[in-house]
Amino acid sequence: MLTAIIGLASALVYGSADFLGGLAARRISALRVTAVSAFAGLAALLVASLFVGGRWSAGAVGWGALSGVTGAIAIALLYACLALGPMSILSPLTAVVSAVVPMTWGLLGGDTLAPIGYVALGIALVAVVLVGFVPEKGAVRPSLRGILMAVGSGAMIGAFFILIDQTPDDSGLVPLLVNRAVSGTIMFAAVGVVAVAARLRRTRTAALVGAGGVAVDDSSARPGPVVSGWRPGLLLAVACGFVDAAANVLLLIGIRIGELSVISVLTAMYPAGTIILAAIVLRERIAPVQWVGLVLALIAAGMLAVA
């Protein structure tokens, strides 16, 4: 029962972090949000590690670093596929793959459940699809590129679960610390590459205009004006990092006390936290199909608690 509770709690907290990150991305770029939140989460984990402790070992550092790489790739692919759209198809596809990959790994690795548990996993996967469904008017079918990116993102999220599951039980928060340091470094490097590429593009444009002797307003080549409220955006990104770090801690606890197959499926319901907060804070309407998904998620959690 405790595993089911922690799994659902982890999903809700992850969803809350996504909600904060989405608000922050409206003010500063999504790439900057990801980078800032990664190091904010690292700072939070460093403070928590003073009280929790954990043994630094090759296993803790190695698996933590690999999980940081897969996490960075997962986020990059997620943003890319959602930008291509339609979100109503690619978002739940990513969530389902992120659940199926570690669930399959766990079951093949020896996770065992009562018969009702396997039924519950099936119901939970259906709930993941329904909860993650984002209604879009006139949504078109996704491109092959978008589908491949969504599957890749989900697979990398699933790989993150598997890698964290490999970490030693006595490592405490060490794997998460390494994970954040690696993923944050990768994301900040990506921000730097994008900034340099933009500067080179502007320089090349200015050189071409100058060579042609034509005065052209190059305002379109400059970075767009910062949306009013960039400081709140930065604070939201920091808050996103703190909340996401808490979700990672819950995930780590759940994996260490329960079955990977169960925790991964329950955590994949993270869109629930996002849509609930969006309904409360932004007054966004929860679609009937999403209500069905939320109910099925609770039913599946209860069945898994019994199993």
Image (spheres, helix red, strand yellow):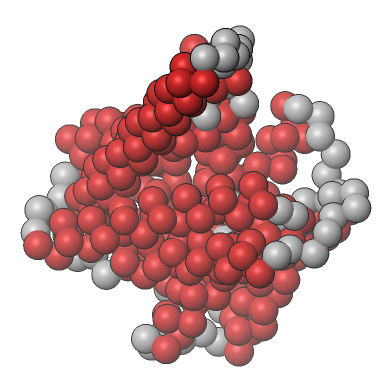
Q: Is residue 304 above or below residue 255?
A: below
Residue plotted at (9% across, 59% down): 57
- Residue 170 position, x and y percent, is 17, 60
Q: Is residue 140 left or right of residue 256?
A: right
Where does the C terminus fall, quadrant-wise? bottom right
Quarter of the view holding residue 275 = top right
Q: Nearer the viewer, residue 11 or 216?
A: 216
Q: Is residue 191 left or right of residue 281?
A: left
Q: Is residue 137 above or below residue 123?
A: above
Q: Is residue 295 left or right of residue 81?
A: right
Q: Is residue 57 visible?
A: yes
- Residue 260 position, x and y percent, is 43, 72
Q: Is residue 137 above or below residue 93?
A: above
Residue plotted at (59% across, 45% down): 15
Q: Nearer the viewer, residue 190 or 284?
A: 190
Q: Nearer the viewer, residue 219 or 19?
A: 219
- Residue 235 position, x and y percent, is 47, 19
Residue plotted at (42% across, 80% down): 106
Q: Is residue 89 left or right of residue 265?
A: right
Q: Is residue 224 visible?
A: no
- Residue 181 position, x and y percent, is 24, 42
Residue plotted at (57% across, 10% down): 215
